Image (spheres, rainbow, N blue to C red):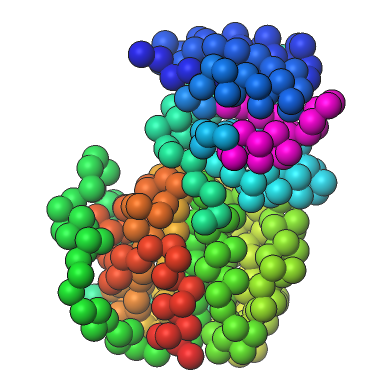
């Protein structure tokens, strides 16, 4: 049976182009169209779709308000179509906080010409998210880093240093046992870290907020955040986190100093690396076309391994794919510590599962436990 999709958009053109594109996939079927938020709420209750695509700006009722009403009635995965502007980013972050699982750029040019890239991305995203229950907030030494690091040198090192993680199929029994274990937890960090690096993708904005809100203003470590997001979104996301958290959060700028209680968010469309000079700083580098993710957790983890060796605590949160796995391997070779989010609390159990399956995760934790555990282990 195909995945049943409800399309919500006030543009007649966009409605029908989306319907045609979605229906091209044999495992997807548009079962209804709504032209405003109120109609979306009614049709979601009536048709009970497997997934909803949602516009953000509509008459009668906007997309964020519609999401709140829909989620209050019945939890259903929602994919937002978002404008790639600063204002669009703020609205999209509101939608994610309200219960939407992910977003995709709303590009009329791509839709008009039925871009194959858009088709592939949309089809994959819909099928993946439709299988997810919507969640409300709820070794060998690594060579010394080049004094002038580049994304290209980091990529080359990552490709030759760590084997690719095994393909992800099902959750291994060892992880099932750990997640369900009632045995006393005697785990402690083996080394006192000098920096905390956290990475995430799908579901990450809500997950990162939950982790960081738990940290006190006097948290003793500098923090680097890598969230898969497009340009313009990371500035709005950093500002939102800064208002929510006791620690300081801001989008990283090339040359920013690492400071205790300060979280620097990697800018969308660029790569972030670490530099030992001046007591520790960040380098924000132009994108490299060979890297899929911009920013990439692999790049930042690899740089952290080169810079801080065994004094890094890496945390991998919810997200599609396996970004971070190769970089995690470098951290483990240096003796650093890795934590990963458990399957039950992930929106998408991809990135953390890749790390756990490769044997790089020292501790698998529920999202609600990660922030308090950081305070317990580090303070």
Q: Is residue 28 left or right of residue 342?
A: right
- Residue 213 shows in the view: yes
In the image, residue 13 sits, relative to residue 231, either above or below, namely: above
Residue 55 shown in magenta? yes
- Of residues 246 and 249, the one nearer the viewer is 246
Estimate the x, y position of residue 148 in percent, counting from the top left: 59, 73
Q: Quadrant of residue 116?
A: top right
Image quarter of residue 253: bottom right
Residue 286 seen in this snapshot: no
- From the top left corner, tell me how far across and down residue 119 is, in percent: 55, 21
Q: Is residue 162 above or below residue 294?
A: below
Q: Quadrant of residue 283?
A: bottom right
Q: Which residues fall within the magenta stretch?
A: 52-72
Q: Who is closer to the viewer here, 237 or 280? A: 237
Residue visible at 69% across and 49% down in the picture = 93
Q: Does the magenta portion include 65?
A: yes
Q: Quadrant of the N terminus?
A: top left
The residue nearer to you, when weighing 192 against 311, is 192
Image position, residue 352 (x, y; %): 36, 56
């Amino acid at each position: 049976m195909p995945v049943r999709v409800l399309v919500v958009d006030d543009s007649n053109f966009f409605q029908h182009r989306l319907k045609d594109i979605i229906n091209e996939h044999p495992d997807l079927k548009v079962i209804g169209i709504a032209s405003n938020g109120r109609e979306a709420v009614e049709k979601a209750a009536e048709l009970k779709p497997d997934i909803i695509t949602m516009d953000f700006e509509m008459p009668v009722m906007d997309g964020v308000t519609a999401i709140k009403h829909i989620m209050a009635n019945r939890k259903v995965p929602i994919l937002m179509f978002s404008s790639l502007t600063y204002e669009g980013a703020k609205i999209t972050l509101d939608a994610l906080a309200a219960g939407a699982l992910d977003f995709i750029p709303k590009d009329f040019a791509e839709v008009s010409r039925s871009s194959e890239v858009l088709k592939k991305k949309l089809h994959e995203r819909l099928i993946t998210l439709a299988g997810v229950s919507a969640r409300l907030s709820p070794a060998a030494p690594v060579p010394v880093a080049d004094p002038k690091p580049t994304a290209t040198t980091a990529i080359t090192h990552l490709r030759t240093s760590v084997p690719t993680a095994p393909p992800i199929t099902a959750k291994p029994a060892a992880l099932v046992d750990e997640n369900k274990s009632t045995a006393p937890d005697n785990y402690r960090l083996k080394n006192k870290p000098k920096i905390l690096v956290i990475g995430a993708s799908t579901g990450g904005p809500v997950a990162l907020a939950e982790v960081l809100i738990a940290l006190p203003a006097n948290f003793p470590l500098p923090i680097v955040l890598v969230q898969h997001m497009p340009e313009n979104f990371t500035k709005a996301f950093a500002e939102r986190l800064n208002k929510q958290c006791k620690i300081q959060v801001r989008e990283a700028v090339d040359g920013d100093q690492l400071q205790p209680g300060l979280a620097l968010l990697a800018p969308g469309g660029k790569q972030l690396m670490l530099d030992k000079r001046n007591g520790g700083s960040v380098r924000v580098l132009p994108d490299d076309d060979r890297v899929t993710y911009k920013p990439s957790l692999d790049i930042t983890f690899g740089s952290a391994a080169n810079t801080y060796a065994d004094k890094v605590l890496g945390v991998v949160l919810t997200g599609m794919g396996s970004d971070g796995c190769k970089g995690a391997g470098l951290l483990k070779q240096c003796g650093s510590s890795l934590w990963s989010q458990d399957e039950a609390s992930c929106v998408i159990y991809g990135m953390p599962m890749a790390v756990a399956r490769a044997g790089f995760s020292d501790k698998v934790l529920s999202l609600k436990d990660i922030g308090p555990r950081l305070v317990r282990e580090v303070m």
